[in-house]
Image (cartoon, grey):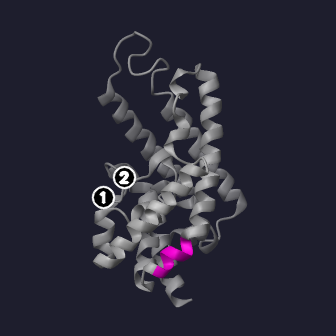
Amino acid sequence: MLRQCRWVAVAAVLLSGSMVSAQQRPGGGQGGFGGGFGGGTNSPFTLVRNEAVQKELNLSDEQVGDLKTLGDKVSEETRSAGGGREAFQGLQDLPREERDKKMAELLAKGEEARKKVSEKFQPDLDKILEAAQRDRLKQIQIQADGSRAYQNAEVVAALKISKEQQDKLAAISKEFGDKTRELFPRGGAGGGGGERPNFEEMQKKMTELNAARDKQLTEVLTADQKSA
């Protein structure tokens, strides 16, 4: 119980801090703990295969080997359940409206598949890691999630984020997600044969949008939640 309280306290600081600084972390989370495929929250099974995370957790060679074996099992079962990248093949050939609808369906299905697989193998992960390593991994996961950390069920419970707050946070994320997608040309990189997009300008606008999004997300939290 005390260990949980310690990581929750750190998680609260990371959550409030990451929301206002996520745009300053090129390539993912601070310290090289990058984001995962599809923009979802960072899976602990993915993070523990990151060399930077392994070093941070001070894993033994035996633990690294056991985690690789476990990770292979998780990846295979995720693919079998429809949560892998293979499900997205061929989407580029569909009309935009149909592609967007199919993409949303696949993302929802994939998220559900990954959730079930993670729950199944979490006990195996806990057996491999020591208590202190598990605590630190949770902190890293929240840190790497950045502005998505509020979706973490344990963080929501620990900080007592209300349903109303969750709805506001989700609405803000959707709003800025839509604005980000609008930056990309509808016809692909070439804009359907038009002028080549200015990627430097797009990156600048994305950074500005991220900063505005994170500011609004942070404002949803109460003072107590930010300082918990």
Going by the numbered disc 2, the residue's amino acid type is Gly
**Distance (Cα) linking label 2 and label 1:** 7 Å
Residue 154 % position (x, y) = 59, 70
What residue is drawn where x is 60% and y is 68%?
Answer: 120
Give 199 or 62, whichever is nearer the viewer. 62
Residue 39 % position (x, y) = 49, 47
* Figure disc tally: 2
Residue 133 seen in render: yes
Residue 160 % position (x, y) = 65, 71
Q: Secondary structure at mark 2?
A: loop
**Mark drawn on residue 28:** 2
- Disc 2 and disc 1 in contact, CB within 8 angstroms: yes
Res 161 quadrant in image: bottom right
**Which quarter of the image is occupied by the N terminus?**
bottom right
> Seen from this angle, which residue lies furthest top?
193
Highlighted magenta segment, given as a residue range: 122-127
> Seen from this angle, which residue lies furthest right?
163
Give 33 or 48, whichever is nearer the viewer. 48
> Seen from this angle, which residue lies furthest bottom?
2
Q: Report whether 29 appears left or right of 135.
A: left
Q: Secondary structure at mark 1?
A: helix
Residue 50 position (above or below residue 217):
below
Going by the numbered disc 1, the residue's amino acid type is Gly
The residue under label 1 is 32
Residue 226 position (above or below residue 144):
below
Give 102 or 42, whichever is nearer the viewer. 102
What residue is drawn where x is 66% and y is 39%?
Answer: 105
- Does the magenta stretch mainly form a helix, a strand or a loop? helix
Residue 103 % position (x, y) = 59, 35
Residue 169 seen in render: no
